[in-house]
Amino acid sequence: MSASPLRCEVARLRRTRRASRRAIYPGSFDPVTYGHIDVIERAAHVFDEVIVAVANNIQKKPLFDTRERVAMLLESTKSIKGIRIDVFDGLVIDFAHKNNANVLIRGLRMVSDFEYEFQMALTNRRLAEDIETVFLMPSEGYSFLSSTLIKEAVSLGADVSSFVPEDVAKRLKKRLSSRRRQGA
């Protein structure tokens, strides 16, 4: 005799509830900013465990390699309980399944982020119905930060110490000044 639809739904909800205690916050984090850290802290208050997943995407040309981005995240988030840093290749939904998580955290800074993030969330839902996307906004003081703008500001000589942790600011300055000397 097959299980009733109600029993199947209750079992699915129990699995979902268990899995929803673990969320994935994917990104390139090239480099990590105070906006990223703010979203990580917010997610850590909601979920039992947040896996900060550093994308290893060979199509993008990051300033820092995966190992360096992980090191910056480890240093910058060492005081936040309930998180772990990991690296993933491929689809984030596959990484989520592998880690028994059914929630993806996405940071929304500005309204302009929403269209892309909404499209991504719907695509992920179509590929994996059991994975939900939760949007978190950073504090308004960090809502304008983007790794791209920070890299550009540093390359033009700006002090970005109010946008990124001290270690990250030093690494940015060193990396971008060496690139300038090399003519890259």
Image (spheres, helix red, strand yellow):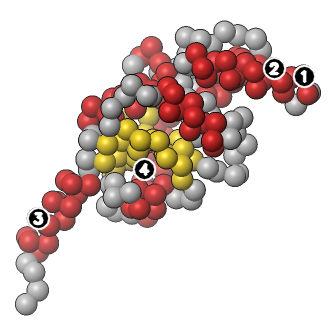
Residue 123 visible from this viewpoint: no
The quarter holding residue 12 reads bottom left
Q: Earlier in the sequence, mark 2 or mark 4?
A: 4
Per the model, the C-alpha gap separating discs 4 and 3 is 25 Å
Q: Amino acid at mark 3?
A: Val
Q: Position of residue 79 (x, y in %)?
A: 39, 25
Per the model, the C-alpha gap separating discs 2 and 4 is 37 Å
Q: Which residue is mark 2?
A: 177
Residue 118 visible from this viewpoint: yes
Q: Is label 4 in a helix, a strand or a loop?
A: helix
Q: Amino acid at mark 2?
A: Ser
Q: Earlier in the sequence, mark 3 or mark 1?
A: 3
- Residue 121, numbered label: 4
From the image, state whether disc 4 or disc 3 is nearer to you: 3
Q: Which residue is mark 3?
A: 10
From the image, state whether disc 3 or disc 1 is nearer to you: 1
Local crowd at mark 4 within 10 Å, few (<14), some, or many (≥20)? some
